[in-house]
Amino acid sequence: MTQKSSKRKTVSRKAVPEDVEKPIVRQQTCVLLVEDEALIAEIIGEALSESGHAVHAVANAQEAIAHLANGARVDLLFTDINLPGELDGIGLAQHVRAANPQLPILFASGRWWRLEELQTLPNAATLRKPYSPARACEAVELLLAEQSSGTDDLGPEREAPALAL
């Protein structure tokens, strides 16, 4: 008769005291960055990633629409207004808002007069170029906070002030 010896590993677990705070796990925000200037897209994408956001960067509105059509989760659209192709950033925003009216949108442009017309859109803000990566991150955070709290943290003009790079 053959006997098998069973070896069991004993794992000791330390009890976590009740008075120790457990870290809050925050779901990563998904930002769709639409910027045709590769260097700007790289710098801003990296800054947003370092701030804890998942970033998907594309160079034009058609690529953004294709990304959304694939069912990708997007919590905020960050788009330049002046984009190559059939749709600019405003046309992209209209297309996206038709499917998701509450999606926060951050518009960026060096053509300031185009930003003025967008300041009254709900759940949207504008960012004047040039802006720093830190300012872009701050504008994203303010817009997301506004969405979650229902307040208008960017003020009556709804424009995030520009900072030089």
Image (cartoon, rainbow, N blue to C red):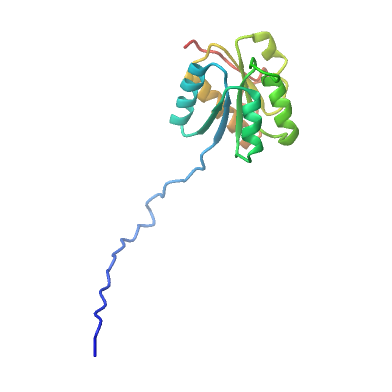
Kindly identify the residue that appears in the image at 38 percent across and 53 percent down.
Answer: 19
Q: Which residue lies at the image location 55% right of the left edge and 13% below the top edge?
A: 162
Question: Is residue 151 visible to the viewer in this orientation of the structure?
Answer: no
Rendered view: 122 above or below 129: below
- Which residue is the extreme one toward the right? 98
Q: Does residue 26 show up?
A: yes
Quadrant showing the N terminus:
bottom left
Q: Quadrant of residue 96?
A: top right
| Image spot of residue 50 (x, y percent) | 43, 30
Tell me if 128 is positioned left or right of 117 in this view.
Answer: left
Q: Estimate the x, y position of residue 86 in percent, counting from the top left.
A: 71, 19
Asked whether 48 or 91 is in front, the reply is 91
Q: Say which of 49 and 143 sits in front.
A: 49
Q: Position of residue 62 (x, y in %)?
A: 66, 26
Residue 17 found in image quarter? bottom left
- Image coordinates of residue 31 in percent, x first then y, are 56, 31
Question: Count the marks: how many?
Answer: 0
Q: Is residue 48 above or below residue 17?
A: above
**Front-lying residue, 92 or 137:** 92
Relative side of 12 to 109, left or right: left
Answer left or right for 130 relative to 7.
Answer: right
Left or right, residue 13 beside residue 26:
left
Residue beneath the point at 51% across and 25% down: 137
Q: Nearer the viewer, residue 67 or 128?
A: 67
Q: Residue furthest front?
A: 1
